[in-house]
Image (cartoon, helix red, strand yellow):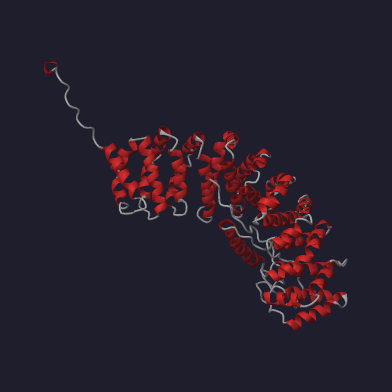
């Protein structure tokens, strides 16, 4: 069973604009709030999100900050005046460009700017200037415009795409990073943008940038690629280009490197791999590149890190890594052989993550349960290993967690479907009291899974039916007899359990020889 293809923004990066006088802790808290919202969007829906970089270098005193959107939109007259000032001396240009950039954080100002004749031509002219300060300020203005949701603003930015790609090969790390995020923002909007970016060689240029030793550039490449990979045209137009290059191997390398310096780069490329795997364009290639054992080793390392240090922040990487492993397992039956030597270690890693991220990051628990489901779907060996773990009671405890119960029951059904030995072991693990308790919930989907699991237990290990009746299981079923969704299954289970638990009938005396 494939995990849902989710998308969006992972680490939100830095947002542009003047900073007010805030403490470092306040800035970190704001960034965490934004990142949390973007991460949630990435997990829960196919959402392509845009990012604004922070600029931490502007410290001129006497300027009103815009962190949090404190500046007012520019009037048309103010936009015109700023454009006129941009034509003047260098110092005046930089000051005017900076004010323009702050104003372009507002939708109204963006629309006024692009309507003025020659505005974009002037801005792009400054962006291509050989004066570094002017070029950076113009690049920030383009970056602000790229964050717009207005199609007209996006269309106005199109003439800049070839220059943005050109400057990815430059020597300025700051400019390269800014161009990457601007391209990433532009790449999500329309087919027109993609038709310009791909023929202009965006994939080869990104492949070249990926070789950069600078983590800021690597992370920017991951962001731009993830934006492209979430498009509706990705499976046909973009992923084949990536798989035909060496990009997927570089992605695997970067997902596993420099974790001690931060997870930003690894997070971006883990999501890129997730989008590629979910496309199912050519997962056999990724499997041949040993993507599965590579990601499994990474998950084992992450699990060990959660036990040695605080787990906070690692959920950003654990989520896409677990999804990649789960989907590769569902993709190719030959993957099971790759895991036999590490089966118990992988299961333990999943449980360690479950325990470490409860209750704060319940979505990680759900991802790990999905992994357990795919691991146990077709492997009696892994089902046996699961039952043998000292962490197995934690799985039963999760039956009482509303957002996890259905996935837990799916795993238990996988185990019970393997036959009498597994059902006997499940019965001995005190599974019945947990299942009877789970019948008290009002979730029809969870109840349906409980009924299926009970049916498997009674079928393969009839002794479980005796204990079920002794532990008031029939009374627990009674509350669902009027539920049309599960009524038929409830009646069948009541009948089966009653028959199996009924005392044997006395056998008639054998006929004597005199009666013959």
- The residue sitting at 40% across, 43% down in the picture is 453
Number of numbered labels in the structure image: 0
Q: Position of residue 194 (x, y in %)?
A: 72, 59
Residue 214 against residue 134 in the figure, above or below:
above
- The residue sitting at 53% across, 43% down in the picture is 374
Residue lying at the far bottom in this picture: please name it.
77
Q: Position of residue 467 (x, y in %)?
A: 31, 40
**Residue closer to the observer: 337 or 72:** 337
Q: Quadrant of residue 63?
A: bottom right
- The residue sitting at 83% across, 76% down in the picture is 86
Query: Left of 290 or right of it: where is 177?
Result: right
**Residue closer to the observer: 167 or 435:** 167
Q: Is residue 263 visible?
A: no
| Quadrant of image for the C terminus | top left
Q: Position of residue 303 (x, y in %)?
A: 59, 45
Residue lying at the far left in this picture: please name it.
514
- The residue sitting at 57% across, 34% down in the picture is 340
Q: Is residue 48 visible?
A: yes
Query: Left of 251 or right of it: where is 401?
Result: left
Residue 82 against residue 4 in the figure, above or below:
below
Q: Position of residue 11 (x, y in %)?
A: 65, 58
**Residue closer to the observer: 214 or 474:** 474
**Residue closer to the observer: 358 or 39:** 39
Q: Quadrant of residue 473?
A: top left
């Amino acid at each position: 069973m494939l995990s849902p293809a989710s998308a969006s923004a992972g680490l939100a990066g830095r947002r542009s604009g003047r900073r007010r006088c805030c403490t470092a802790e306040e800035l970190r808290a704001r960034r965490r709030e934004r990142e949390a919202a973007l991460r949630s969007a990435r997990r829960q829906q196919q959402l392509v999100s845009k990012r604004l970089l922070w600029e931490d270098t502007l410290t001129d005193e006497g300027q009103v900050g815009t962190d949090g959107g404190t500046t007012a939109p520019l009037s048309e007259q103010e936009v015109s005046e700023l454009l006129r000032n941009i034509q003047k001396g260098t110092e005046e240009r930089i000051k005017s460009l900076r004010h323009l950039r702050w104003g372009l954080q507002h939708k109204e100002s963006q629309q006024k700017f692009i309507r003025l004749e020659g505005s974009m031509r002037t801005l792009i002219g400054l962006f291509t200037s050989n004066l570094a300060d002017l070029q950076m300020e113009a690049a920030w203005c383009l970056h602000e415009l790229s964050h717009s949701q207005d199609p007209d603003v996006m269309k106005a930015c199109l003439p800049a795409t070839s220059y943005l790609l050109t400057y990815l090969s430059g020597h300025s790390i700051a400019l390269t990073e800014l161009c990457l995020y601007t391209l990433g923002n532009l790449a999500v909007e329309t087919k027109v943008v993609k038709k310009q970016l791909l023929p202009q060689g965006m994939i080869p240029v990104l492949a070249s940038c990926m070789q950069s030793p600078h983590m800021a550039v690597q992370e920017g490449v991951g962001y731009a690629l993830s934006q492209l990979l979430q498009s509706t045209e990705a499976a046909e137009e973009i992923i084949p280009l990536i798989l035909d290059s060496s990009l997927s191997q570089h992605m695997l390398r970067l997902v596993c490197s420099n974790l001690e310096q931060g997870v930003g780069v690894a997070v971006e490329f883990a999501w890129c791999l997730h989008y590629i795997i979910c496309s199912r364009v050519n997962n056999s290639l990724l499997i041949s590149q040993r993507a599965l054992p590579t990601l499994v080793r990474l998950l084992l390392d992450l699990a060990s890190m959660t036990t040695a240090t605080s787990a906070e922040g690692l959920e950003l990487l654990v989520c896409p890594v677990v999804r990649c492993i789960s989907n590769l397992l569902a993709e190719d039956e030959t993957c099971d052989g790759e895991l036999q030597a590490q089966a118990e270690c992988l299961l333990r890693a999943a449980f360690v993550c479950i325990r470490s991220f409860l209750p704060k990051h319940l979505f990680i628990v759900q991802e790990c349960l999905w992994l357990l489901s795919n691991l146990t779907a077709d492997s009696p060996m892994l089902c046996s290993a699961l039952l043998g773990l000292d962490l197995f009671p934690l799985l039963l405890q999760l039956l009482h967690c509303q957002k996890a119960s259905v996935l837990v029951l799916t795993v238990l059904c996988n185990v019970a479907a393997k036959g009498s030995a597994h059902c006997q072991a499940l019965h001995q693990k005190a599974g019945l009291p947990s299942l009877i308790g789970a019948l008290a919930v009002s979730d029809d989907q969870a109840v349906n899974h409980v009924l299926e699991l009970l049916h498997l237990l009674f079928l393969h290990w009839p002794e479980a039916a005796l204990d079920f009746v002794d532990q008031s299981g029939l009374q627990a079923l009674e509350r669902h007899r009027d539920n049309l969704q599960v009524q038929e299954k409830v009646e069948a289970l009541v009948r089966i359990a009653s028959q199996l638990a009924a005392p044997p009938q006395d056998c008639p005396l054998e006929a004597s020889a005199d009666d013959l």
